[in-house]
Image (cartoon, rainbow, N blue to C red):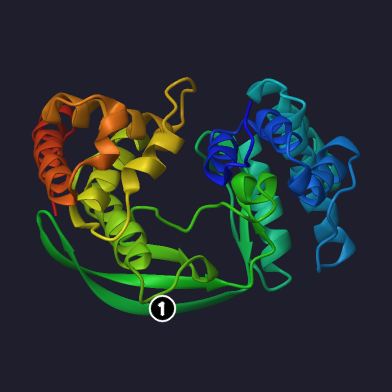
């Protein structure tokens, strides 16, 4: 029986999409009663959020809110929850027969852009859920990576009204801090980082720059391989934080499409193999040992990528 609330354990359940397990754990602790009440109101009682946008856009956002509830609280199959989402969105636009991608990339995107917002649809770690924001600012950074220094433009995004599924089911406590889509541009959720901290320099800049570099180099690299290599880069350059604890909380190979979770599992397995210590002892090793192991694993993955993927000719 747990006697003290463990915030890391709670967040780990949410990162893995296990909302009901997270809520069950939360309910055990009287000092978390206020937080638990917020979860029950939203997911059990269906007291959905109202956003500071007009009724048309709120109607679209309600479709996604219901999808989040059906996926993570009611635990419908991914196929059924997605089918219901597209059906509701089609009803919003009085459509019939449109594919999911067409509804998001054409109808939903256009509706938000017409009101001054930027919209990014698609899936994050296998689940649907858009990023919608109002403001952007671009700066350029030189980023050192294992294979050399590269320069990238970083687009800082602000004024969000939705940050996909993880931000929603965690009530804003956990979420994606940035991404790269293969166009050489790194997107950063501005309020997720202190720009002077290692978390920004390493977990955003270097992580996403490695994505950008790999997408520029290898044709069709999988999400799992992209995340594996970018997480190894974080380990190579991090000195102030114990990232293995975080990766252990993300590790989950049970669900296809969960690139982050599968990559975290691979890193833990690789570190155990190279350092010849049990998993529970990894976090107590000196940072220099973990950095050296990460460099070895990264070099192995580079050799593997050269055999697995064709290279893109400049």
Quarter assignment of residue 309 = top left
Question: Which percent across, then down, holds residue 268?
Answer: 28, 31
**Residue 86 shows in the view:** no
Task: Report the front residue among 231 and 100.
Answer: 231
Q: Is residue 109 left or right of residue 9?
A: right
For residue 132, above or below residue 256: below
Secondary element at tag 1: strand
Q: Is residue 290 left or right of residue 59?
A: left
Task: Report the front residue among 266 and 111.
Answer: 266
- Circle count: 1
Quarter assignment of residue 263 = top left
Q: Considering the image in quadrants, where does the C terminus appear?
A: bottom left
Question: Which percent across, then down, holds residue 108?
Answer: 70, 53
Name the residue beneath numbered marker 1. 138
Task: Report the front residue among 292 and 43.
Answer: 292
Question: Which percent across, then down, holds residue 28?
Answer: 74, 34
Quarter assignment of residue 249 = top left
Q: Residue at x 20, y 57 (%)?
A: 237
Q: Considering the image in quadrants, where does the N terminus appear?
A: top right
**Residue 132 shows in the view:** yes
Q: Is residue 262 left or right of residue 314?
A: right
For residue 126, above or below residue 31: above
């Amino acid at each position: 029986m747990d006697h003290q609330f463990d915030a890391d354990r709670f967040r780990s359940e949410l990162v893995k999409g296990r909302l009901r397990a997270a809520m069950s754990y939360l309910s055990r602790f009287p000092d978390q009663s206020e937080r638990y009440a917020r979860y029950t109101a939203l997911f059990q009682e269906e007291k959905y959020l109202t956003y500071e946008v007009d009724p048309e856009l709120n109607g679209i956002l309600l479709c996604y809110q219901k999808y989040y509830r059906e996926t993570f609280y009611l635990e419908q199959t991914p196929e059924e929850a997605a089918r219901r989402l597209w059906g509701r969105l089609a009803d919003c636009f009085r459509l019939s027969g449109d594919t999911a991608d067409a509804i998001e990339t054409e109808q939903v995107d256009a509706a938000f852009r017409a009101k001054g917002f930027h919209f990014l649809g698609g899936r994050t770690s296998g689940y649907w859920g858009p990023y919608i924001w109002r403001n952007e600012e671009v700066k350029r950074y030189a980023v050192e990576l294992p294979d050399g220094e590269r320069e990238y433009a970083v687009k800082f995004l602000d004024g969000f009204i939705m940050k996909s599924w993880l931000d929603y089911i965690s009530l804003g406590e956990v979420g994606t801090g940035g991404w790269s889509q293969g166009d050489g541009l790194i997107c950063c959720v501005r309020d997720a980082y202190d720009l002077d901290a290692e978390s920004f320099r390493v977990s955003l800049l270097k992580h996403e720059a490695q994505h950008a570099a790999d997408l520029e180099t290898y044709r069709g690299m999988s999400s799992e391989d992209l995340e594996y290599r970018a997480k190894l880069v974080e380990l190579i350059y991090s000195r102030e934080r114990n990232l293995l604890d975080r990766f252990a909380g993300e590790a989950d190979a049970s669900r296809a499409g969960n690139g982050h979770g599968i990559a975290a599992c691979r890193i833990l397995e690789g570190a155990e193999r190279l350092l010849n210590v049990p998993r529970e002892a990894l976090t107590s090793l000196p940072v220099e040992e973990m950095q050296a192991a990460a460099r070895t694993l990264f070099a192995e993955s580079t050799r593997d990528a050269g055999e697995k993927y064709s290279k893109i000719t400049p």
